[in-house]
């Protein structure tokens, strides 16, 4: 998916996943259990198949209400199943997932995940109630159209311009052409705003023809959540989102809150109106809307919406068809399970008792007040239970390294499909709750400052009697279906001997069976992606997204300076010491910012609102020049021009800039996660 300029690679994190490559002969699918896509790949073992069968008998597969809700209101699907990007490649491909349209058991997929993957095959235009419509299956998220007096009010605009444009065309073809009069961004994740330019033009927003509404904190969080650790997050996405895995019953099958992520171009038009109060009512184009801010839930900035005249409740991404992530495995700050639960409870008491329909930016709607209250209460309780009962256990001494084997959802919730471990899993979320309150340490000094795995592993291997002994034992564990035990010893061997392909292949075989067994696509993808990398090396060259400059333009000067301090290698700055006064002054936007940037102790710091009187260098420039740096387009020739035209003024010792430049490092987007890959 993505490309960014390495500099800013992280901005687009949300954006970044390549649409999985598709194996032509594997995706047409009527075959029940086809050949594995990889020469070293293994089919599900008898142990895996028996676990899948056990799940079939334990879970309430006769409860079909989700299927009724998922199909209700279907109007039409388009006569195509691929959406092309303007750049010429395929941005979206539903056809690749057709192998899921079967009632056969696919033993390489957890039966509950196979069910969710089938539910997410929604594709086309749906009526939620008269006057409210959704286009589903055009991207990871849904886009929702509210019929106003004169035009459409659009709630969330997908990730890519191309998929958003296709969705707007579909509804206009089916229900008659109407202009978009307003857009609501429900929250600060890119699959909810990135497609904006496929729906409205910047001119129409500027002229006031189209209003864009967002929750408090939207712009700040859109950028900041993903910048500082961006390169690491991008790399980790290959695991959580399985971006290098083929779409296949042995590979990528679903992403829980939608099929996958589109691969078109991502943009951002800043909101023209921010909802600041917890509850705020606005009428646009004759539609009365009550916004409900829920900061610190699924996103740092997020809001629900209540339509009192329609008794309709829009749950943003706060309520979906799954346990969501308290900790998202690609990496992000751990979320607050209790705040999330309370956000749902507020909505339940404020709107939920009257609502006749509840719809959201992912999955499918719920109809009827009893059903709505059931789902809201269930989702409220699962986040509250996860918070409270994990801490209950922690207060009795259960540690972060044990909690996932101890904590369970209440039995009554385990039977509810909307409370299953798809996007978030009970396993990784329970560890996150402890991490949020107590941190990563289990309070055993042996794990407080442990040796690095590559330093401790050789001793284990030696004491276990060498690699042959380990491989023999691991083989016998694998044959008995004891995949976690085999993983334990093979992991040591792979760290001790990264070039030992036999060990890597055997570890991959164990990861693969575990991947098949997980209900959560986040876990499945992580195990299967690791297996693929152990067999084949790191999967490079996934098609990259071309993200426009919009997101970078939203980055503040201070955020950029903070990020430069992360990008520079302190070890290359030994002995360096300088001070720079920076002024960014912009007549167009009335921007006038001053900073002191100091290099000292191999550390780069900045402070806003100050100037040093003993600076080595003073730089006065404007925002558009700064953007060239942010976008890595500041070539020597361009800089020379800007200096000559007076857009950059340098006073003092310019040598310090050369010194600084020598410390900057371009991060490798494909660093190793497992040794020897
Ligand atoms: Zn989303």
Image (cartoon, rainbow, N blue to C red):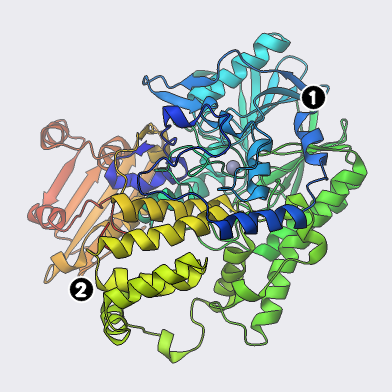
Q: Quadrant of the C terminus?
A: bottom left
Which residue is denoted by mark 1 in the rendering?
73
- Quarter of the image for residue 213 reads top right
From where the camera sits, is residue 225 visible?
no
Q: Is residue 478 above or below residue 197?
A: below
Q: Residues within 10 Å of mark 1 (few under 14, many from 20)?
A: some
Give coordinates of residue 189: x percent, y percent. 54, 44
Task: Report the residue marked by disc 2.
Answer: 601
Determine the residue positioned at 88% across, 31% down: 309
Residue at the image position 87 percent from the left and 49 percent from the top: 373
* Residue 364, above or below 522: above
Of labels 2 and 1, the one closer to you = 1
State the residue at coordinates (58%, 27%). 138
Is disc 1 placed on a helix, strand or loop?
Answer: loop
From the viewer's perspective, tell me whether residue 135 is left or right of residue 292: left
Q: Residue furthest bottom?
A: 445
Position in image of residue 462 (x %, y %): 26, 84
Q: Earlier in the sequence, mark 2 or mark 1?
A: 1
**Coordinates of residue 368 in the picture (x, y in percent):** 90, 38
Measured from the top left, where is residue 598 in percent x and y?
23, 64
Closer-to-camera residue (525/564): 525
Quarter the N terminus occupies: top left
Q: Quadrant of residue 363?
A: top right
Q: Is residue 448 left or right of residue 372?
A: left
Asked which secondary structure carries label 2, the reply is loop
């Amino acid at each position: 998916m993505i490309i960014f300029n390495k500099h800013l690679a992280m901005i687009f994190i949300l954006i970044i996943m390549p649409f999985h490559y598709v194996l032509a002969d594997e995706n047409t699918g009527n075959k029940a259990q086809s050949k594995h896509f990889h020469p070293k790949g293994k089919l599900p073992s008898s142990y895996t198949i028996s676990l899948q069968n056990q799940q079939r008998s334990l879970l309430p597969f006769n409860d079909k209400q989700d299927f009724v809700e998922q199909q209700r209101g279907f109007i039409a699907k388009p006569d195509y199943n691929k959406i092309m990007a303007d750049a010429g490649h395929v941005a979206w491909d539903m056809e690749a997932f057709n192998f899921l349209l079967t009632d056969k058991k696919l033993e390489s997929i957890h039966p509950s995940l196979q069910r969710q993957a089938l539910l997410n095959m929604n594709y086309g235009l749906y009526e939620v109630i008269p006057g409210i419509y959704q286009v589903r299956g055009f991207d990871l998220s849904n886009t929702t159209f509210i019929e106003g007096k004169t035009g459409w009010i659009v709630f969330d605009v997908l990730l890519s311009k191309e998929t958003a444009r296709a969705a707007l065309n579909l509804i206009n073809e089916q229900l008659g052409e109407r202009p978009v009069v307003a857009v609501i961004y429900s929250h600060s994740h890119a699959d909810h705003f990135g497609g904006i330019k496929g729906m409205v033009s910047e001119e129409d927003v500027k002229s006031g023809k189209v209003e864009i509404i967002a929750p408090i904190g939207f712009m700040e969080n859109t950028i900041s959540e993903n910048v500082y650790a961006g390169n690491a997050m991008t790399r980790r996405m290959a695991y959580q989102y399985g971006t290098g895995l083929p779409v296949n019953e042995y590979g990528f099958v679903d992403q829980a809150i939608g099929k996958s992520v589109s691969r078109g171009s991502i943009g951002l038009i800043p909101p023209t109106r921010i909802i600041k109060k917890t509850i705020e009512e606005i009428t646009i184009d004759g539609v009365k809307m009550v916004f409900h801010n829920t900061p610190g839930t699924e996103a740092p900035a997020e809001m629900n919406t209540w339509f009192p005249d329609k008794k309709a409740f829009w749950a943003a991404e706060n309520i979906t068809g799954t346990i969501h992530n308290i900790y998202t495995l690609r990496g992000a700050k751990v979320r607050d399970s209790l705040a999330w639960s309370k956000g749902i409870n507020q909505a339940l008491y404020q709107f939920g008792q009257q609502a006749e329909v509840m719809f959201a930016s992912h999955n499918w709607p719920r109809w009827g007040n009893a059903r709505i209250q059931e789902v809201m209460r269930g989702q409220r309780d699962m986040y509250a239970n996860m918070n409270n009962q994990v801490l209950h256990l922690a207060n009795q001494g259960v540690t972060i390294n044990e909690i996932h084997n101890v904590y369970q959802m209440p039995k009554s919730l385990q039977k509810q499909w909307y409370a299953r471990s798809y996007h978030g899993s009970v396993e990784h979320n329970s560890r996150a709750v402890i991490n949020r309150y107590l941190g990563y340490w289990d309070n055993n000094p042996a794990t407080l400052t442990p040796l690095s795995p590559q330093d401790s592993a050789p001793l284990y291997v030696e004491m276990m009697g060498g690699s042959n002994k380990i491989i023999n034992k691991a083989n016998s564990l694998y044959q008995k279906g004891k995949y976690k035990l085999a993983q334990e010893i093979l992991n040591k061997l792979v760290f001790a001997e990264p070039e030992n392909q036999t060990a890597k292949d055997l570890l991959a075989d164990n990861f693969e069976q575990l991947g098949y067994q997980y209900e959560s696509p986040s876990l499945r993808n992580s195990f299967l992606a690791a297996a693929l990398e152990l067999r084949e090396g790191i999967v490079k060259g996934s098609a990259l997204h071309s993200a426009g400059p919009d997101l970078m333009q939203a980055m503040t000067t201070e955020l950029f300076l903070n990020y430069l301090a992360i990008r520079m290698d302190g070890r290359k700055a030994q002995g360096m010491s300088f001070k720079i006064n920076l002024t960014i002054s912009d007549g167009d936007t009335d921007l006038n910012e001053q900073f002191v940037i100091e290099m000292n102790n191999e550390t780069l710091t900045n402070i806003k609102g100050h100037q040093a009187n003993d600076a080595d260098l003073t730089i006065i420039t404007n925002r558009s020049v700064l953007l060239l740096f942010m976008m890595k387009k500041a070539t020597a020739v361009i800089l020379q021009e800007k200096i000559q035209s007076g857009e950059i003024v340098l006073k003092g010792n310019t040598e310090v800039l050369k010194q600084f430049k020598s410390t900057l490092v371009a991060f490798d987007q494909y660093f190793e996660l497992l040794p020897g890959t």
